[in-house]
Amino acid sequence: MDGLHSATVGVWVNAGGRDERLEQNGIAHFLEHMAFKGTARRSALQIAETIEDVGGYINAYTSRDVTAYYARVLAGDVTLALDVISDIVLNPVFDPREIEVERGVILQEIGQSLDTPDDVIFDWLQEAAYPDQPMGRTILGPSERVSHFGRGDLSGFVSEHYGPGQMIVAAAGAVDHDLIVAQATEIFGDRKPLAKLDRQPAHWRGAEMRRVKDLEQAHFALALEGPGYKDADYFATQIWTSALGGGMSSRLFQKVREERGLCYTIFAQSGFHDDTGMVTIYAGTSSEQIGDLASITIDEIRRSIDTLTEAEVSRAKAQMKAGLLMGLESPSGQAERMARSLAIWGRIPDATEMAGRIDAVSMRDVRDHAARLISDARPALALYGPVGKAPDREELAKRLAA
């Protein structure tokens, strides 16, 4: 990326929460933490110091589909960054003492999540949508499982998922392509490729999870099954979701917050996987107003089938294209996009192609797609807080189908 003095380099492992067996739930995230706790060459402190001594930044995350390890550094330190990232990914020592320390950290993270209503409600919504299957389990894992993970559990997951065939090295910014390729070849070139393991397919069920608790707000999260990454309706879903609740001009924000004053926060978002997707609507309101909020939300979803306008579709497209292009100006965003594109499609479509595919979606395409989603809807619903008076999933499903 011309004109930059920094770069992001990382390793994206195509294994995440949905690749865990039931007894492994939470191990991918635990492993992400343990990667920073020491290797055969560096202690935990040395890992942090090596990057921070040159003014860099190192981090990682775990999702349902991927675990990523990355660093952002100045141009002259890219080789150092890839050396550190590959070291923590390929050579963790899993010191038993460090495992116990990090177990405590993760248990605190789980506790913090459970104490954050607008965080934990999305885990419950995921479970309601995909019950009793990997896609529906929390990424952090339940505390009772995390409390018993040991060195063998961690090394076992590594041996199953961490190797060529399951990894993507990506770099963007002030990088030299040939140097990256040469270094990656030296690091990974003699490693035996791993066969890609078959993931358990996700099966949308749609259910309700309700937790009544004395909180200030009633938290409401509703989801419909959407398409996967490779589905023809991938872009139509994003456009519809953006028009529904993607910003201050969106239908739900205007109707529920600006006109009725029923909430402070309301939004819609879409998420995608290889074989499924989810359109999610979230809002927080009072116990007295949650019934009105839920009913109006359902009514706006239904109304969009017949009343979505060209102006709304054009605005949503503009937001999507702007987000795409703005992301390309960030080394971290660029590296992330390349790694995920390669994992999903086996290639990296350029911005012009993506913008063209967005522009090709018509208002009629979006309306028809929304109608199909609603006609087949088995909504998932999660409620948390003073939600005793909230309508249940069956009531909302009937209103949606009316």
Image (cartoon, rainbow, N blue to C red):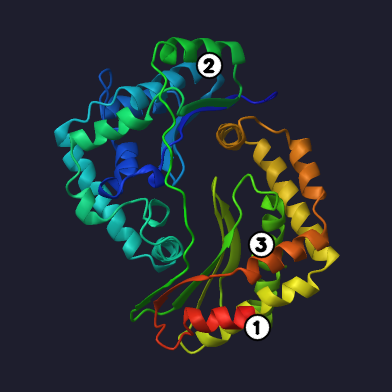
Q: Which mark is residue 109?
A: none
- Badge 2 marks a residue whose secondary structure is helix
Position of the N terminus, as image quadrant, is: top right
Give above or below for 197 relative to 146.
above
Q: Residues within 10 Å of mark 2 (few under 14, many from 20)?
A: some
Q: Name the disc covering residue 402, or none.
A: 1
Q: Secondary structure at mark 1?
A: loop
Query: Which label sits on residue 76?
Result: 2
402 lies left or right of 125: right
The residue drawn where x is 23% and y is 42% is 102
Q: Position of residue 207 (x, y in %)?
A: 44, 71
In the rendered structure, which disc, 1 or 3, sits on the residue that comes first in sequence? 3
What is the C-alpha distance between the residues marked 2 and 1? 62 Å
Residue type beneath disc 2: Gly
- Residue 352: x and y in percent read 78, 36
- In what element is the residue under mark 3? helix
Could you say which is closer to the camera, residue 65 or residue 318?
65
Which label lies toward us, 1 or 3? Answer: 1
Indicate which disc residue 241 carries. 3
The quarter holding residue 271 reads bottom right
Residue 367 position, x and y percent, is 76, 66
Q: Residue at x 40, y 28 (%)?
A: 52
Does residue 389 appear anywhere in the picture? Answer: yes
Placement of 322 over or under 176, stated as above or below:
below
